Amino acid sequence: MGNKKDKGKMLGDGKMLTPRFRIDWPHVCERRPKDAKVNAGKFDITAIFDKDKTDFTLLNKIIEDAGKGLGKRFKKPLKSGEEERDGEDGYENSRFCTLSAKKFKPTVMDATKAIIEDDDEIVPGSFGRAIISAWSYNNENQGVAFNLYALQCLGGGKRLAKGGDGNNSALANESFEELDEMEDTEEPDDIDDDDNDLD
């Protein structure tokens, strides 16, 4: 294959198969809660494209096609990893975007085309590809976003680190000992695991 870059493939009817990307923040098997800070009530995932391995020609084409009639400075879905996610694992030398669905649940499958029904089965940092389309919005802002129809999780890739160094045993031991020494302890408030939304 040499140095040939992956540009994906047009599928007709405005849909395309994306180039291969790394998966982050998977929330495609269950909708985000309605009170989520970002993409409330939607299925969504972040796709991270390696700039050295991706040809963005087709992605840019469907963005420009969807953006016809909008102002010249409409908001585009592809963003710079270095500018928007500086210091975050996996975003170096990348462009990334959100792929989302609201009216229907996207089809999600693994490399063997077996259906995935649990977001916990999707490892952040693994590779994937998706069937998408682009659509425009014109409300308080003007822009183009990507609609997600299907996601295939291909596996591989290094898991993306999500803060901390993973070596917190000393802190945990010290903290838990302090809790054990307290005479009265209160039950913790319910924690919403879905608060880990995109910035």
Image: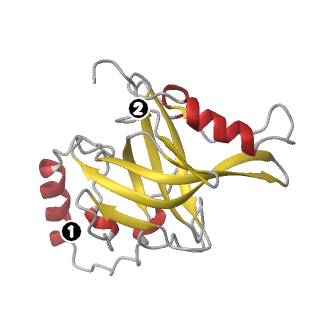
Residue at the top extreme, as displayed = 3
Task: State whether residue 186 is above or below residue 151.
Answer: below
Q: Position of residue 159 (x, y in %)?
A: 24, 45
Q: Residue at x 43, y 39 (%)?
A: 19
Horizontal arrangement in the rendering, residue 38 relative to residue 137 (left or right): left
Q: Quadrant of residue 173?
A: bottom left
Residue, disc 2 = 6
Q: Position of residue 4 (x, y in %)?
A: 36, 22
Task: State whether residue 22 is above or below residue 6.
Answer: below
Q: Are marks 2 and 1 in contact (CB under 8 Å)?
A: no
Please tell me which residue lies in front, 192 or 143: 143
Please tell me which residue lies in front, 195 or 20: 20
Task: Return the mark for residue 179.
Answer: 1
**Lower sequence index among marks 2 and 1:** 2
- The Cα–Cα distance between marks 2 and 1, rounded to whole angstroms, is 53 Å
Q: Residue at x 44, y 58 (%)?
A: 196
Q: Specify whether residue 199 is in view.
A: no
Residue type (three-letter) at the residue carrying disc 1: Leu
Q: Secondary structure at mark 2?
A: loop
Q: Quadrant of residue 52?
A: top left
Q: Position of residue 132 (x, y in %)?
A: 54, 53
Q: Residue at x 57, y 37 (%)?
A: 59
